Amino acid sequence: MLQINNIEVVYNDVILVLKGLSLEVKKGSIVCLLGSNGAGKTTTLKAVSGLLRPDNGEITDGDIIFEGTKIDKKDAAEIVKMGIFQVMEGRRVFKDLTVEENLIAGGYTSSKSDINLNIDKVYSYFPRLKERRNQLAGYMSGGEQQMLAIGRALMAKPKMILMDEPSLGLSPLLVKEIFNIIKKLNKEENTTILLVEQNANMALSVSDYGYIMENGRVVMEGESKELIENEDVKEFYLGMASENKSFRNVKHYRRRKRWLS
Amino acid sequence: MEFFIQILVAGVVIGSIYAIVALGFTLIYKSTGVVNFAQGELLLVGAYICLQLTVEYKLNFVISFFVTLLFMFIFGFLVEKIFLRKMIGEPIISIIMLTIGLSSVFKSLVQLIWGTDTKTFPQIFSEEPVEIGNITISYVYIFSIISVAVFLIIFSVFFKKTKVGIAMRAVASDQQAALSMGIDVKRIFALSWAIAAVVSSVGGILIGNINGINTSLSQFGLKVFPVVILGGLDSILGAIVGGLIIGILENIAGGYIDPIIGGGAKDVFPFIFMIVILMIKPYGLFGTVEVEKV
């Protein structure tokens, strides 16, 4: 469904962030993209959704193909209309708009009757949003704001949702709830999901396939259930060191890390 | 007491016109982040277009009023498209300079075409004032208040209920997030300028009917600053309340202080008030206090 082939992204004409990144997302699947801070995960999502330009970023090489169409030169509005919707990091709800107005803004590309239909659907997924429909989004809790951000995405009826760190700043219980919703959306709405996460454990447990990024490249990929068993992944991303940490291990870690990238 | 109420009425009328011009200013500031120094010139252009249509082309006032609004809508749209669009992403000070430049250009163009003499609208409203109790109110005042009220209601419904209106507020709230949901931000910018030009020209036509028109009318654009500073640069409700307060205060100053000191207080008072407000409430009465997360 989505293919990213060898893309390079440069910010401000000088800072090379993605150095030949490739990945593929199959229709109907949940794919997760893991990596430490600054690895280029968000940049990858923005490259797909056309949101690089406001950040002075540019795809200088490679291409991105969505359902057979090249999309790396298209602007954000066209990409939304083609069926890709990015839920941005940090929720980014419109704070001084009410919940319902946020949803209407999310449905900007759909017709009026679709908006009404989709609002009802969002409310059936998130009854809590319905209770707060006339409340200003800025006054809601982090979990509710995340629900609103996901609900806003549903308004556009996307074929694919790019989700950037939905667990950011949420309690473990809420993280679980959000991930359950992501799974449910994938099953019931048949929405393909590309998920960027720091919470590797959670992300690998809901996804079908995973990519691990470092320094703007994919350094490892595989079925999620294999990745979760992989010793290196366990050590670097799941925080499960097999032996006691000592200075030797730290050195060892550095060596392995170099080998990885 | 009658004198006071008379002043109050005049203040509310002028204040409501300030409010509608300030609404345009706020709209541009809110959605595009541009401080528009050419607001007064938009008003000027609108007023002269309407005058031209009514006097030279002998159109019915109501028709020329709406034709002017249509013209100004396109005018504002084009100004954004031709001049402002290229400046997106440039430093804010350059954009401000550009609007100052535009204001001079518009004003000169108006002077070139229509000259500098004061012109008046033909008598549209009856000279005979309405008497309510002991107070006399002229028809043009009543017309002004009603039309400002109608426009303010139309716009609040537009911003609250329509998809495009909500999208405009969304852009004002978080531009990148708005972009991510397929909202065409550039079109919203153009629309903001178009609406701002329309509301300013409403102000211009009304004030033109009350006082007559010459190019000094563009000073109205400067008067908008105390209004929006008082109301908070980014608040629409603030623009309305600020407009009314400034209009009333200005007229009170004109009525009570001017006779003592021999004039001038009326014009300077709003700015004194603005400075005081800025010193005690830098974000205005209704403005958002920006909280930066570190």
Image (cartoon, coloured by chain):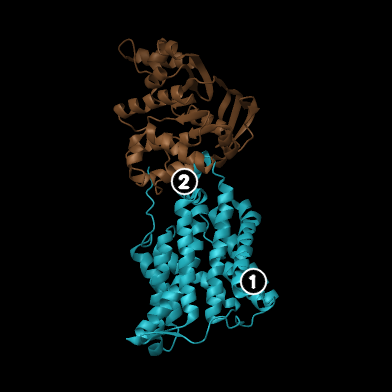
Chain colours: A brown, B cyan
For marks 1 and 2, give the CA distance. 36 Å
Q: Residue at x 62, y 70 (%)?
A: B63
Q: Amino acid at mark 1?
A: Ile
- Give residue B241's position: percent from left, percent from top: 39, 66
Q: Nearer the viewer, residue A12 or B265?
A: B265
Indicate whether A55 appears above or below B290. above
Q: How many neighbours does mark 2 have within 10 angstroms: few (below 14), some (14-19), or many (20 or more)?
A: some
Give the chain of mark 2. Answer: B
Please provide percent x and percent y for residue A205.
Answer: 39, 17
Residue A173 placed where, x, y %?
29, 27
On screen, B191 above or below A253? below
Q: Callout 1: residue from which chain?
A: B
Any part of residue A174 in sight: yes
Nearer to us of marks 1 and 2 is: 1
Tell me, yes or no, whether dots 1 and 2 are on the same chain. yes
Q: Which residue is mark 2?
A: B174
Q: Amino acid at mark 2?
A: Asp
Disc 1 residue crowd, few under 14, some 14–19, many 20+, Cα 10 Å: many
**Helix, strand or loop at mark 1:** helix
Residue B102, percent across and down? 62, 64
| Tag of residue B49 | 1
The image quadrant of residue A126 is top left
Residue drawn at 36 percent across, 69 percent down: B276
> In the rendered view of the protein, which quadrant contains the C terminus of chain B?
top left
Which quadrant does the N terminus of chain B fall into? bottom left
Earlier in the chain: of badge 1 and badge 2, it is: 1
